[in-house]
């Protein structure tokens, strides 16, 4: 975080999924709280994370390729290719959806939403 946001403006987001809330991860976050701001999302709430939508789009694109990747390096290459094919407007729309996602999530008290 200090490399990416050297001026101390880094913000860490997680969805509290089980692997992210492990003892090791929790301990690390506690030890590094002064290094960045940590957003506390609702428990296991992917509705707040636009990365889920983008990941799903990439996964769908990879699954629909005529030749699936055979090695981790092939997968990395395919993911980079598919990332470059995502229209910038798609990414912007995901980010712009946040003002609608937050109230929707609050209405259902952290439960599932239409997002």
Image (cartoon, rainbow, N blue to C red):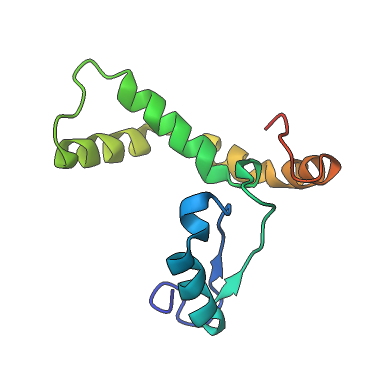
Can residue 32 be seen? no
Residue drawn at x 55%, y 79% is: 33
Image quadrant occupied by the N terminus: bottom left
Height in image: 73 above or below 59? Answer: below
- Where, by quadrant of the figure, is residue 50 drawn? top right
Height in image: 99 above or below 23? Answer: above
Report the side of 102 relative to 21 (left or right). Answer: right
Residue 103 in picture, x, y percent from top left? 82, 45
Residue drawn at x 45%, y 81% is: 6
Residue 84 in picture, x, y percent from top left? 34, 38
Report the side of 48 relative to 91 (left or right). Answer: right
Residue 45 in picture, x, y percent from top left? 64, 45
Residue at the outermost front position = 23
Nearer to me, 72 or 99: 72
Residue at the outermost right position = 107
Image quadrant occupied by the C terminus: top right
């Amino acid at each position: 975080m200090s490399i990416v946001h050297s001026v101390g403006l880094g913000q860490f987001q997680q969805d509290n999924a089980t692997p992210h809330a492990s003892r090791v991860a929790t301990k690390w976050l506690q030890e590094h709280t002064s290094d960045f701001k940590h957003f506390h999302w609702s428990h296991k709430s992917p509705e707040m994370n636009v990365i889920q939508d983008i990941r799903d789009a990439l996964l769908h694109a990879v699954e629909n390729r005529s030749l699936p990747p055979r090695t981790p390096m092939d997968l990395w290459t395919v993911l980079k290719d598919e990332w470059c094919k995502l229209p910038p407007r798609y990414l912007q729309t995901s980010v712009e959806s946040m003002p609608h996602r937050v109230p929707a999530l609050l209405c259902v008290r952290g439960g599932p939403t239409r997002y």
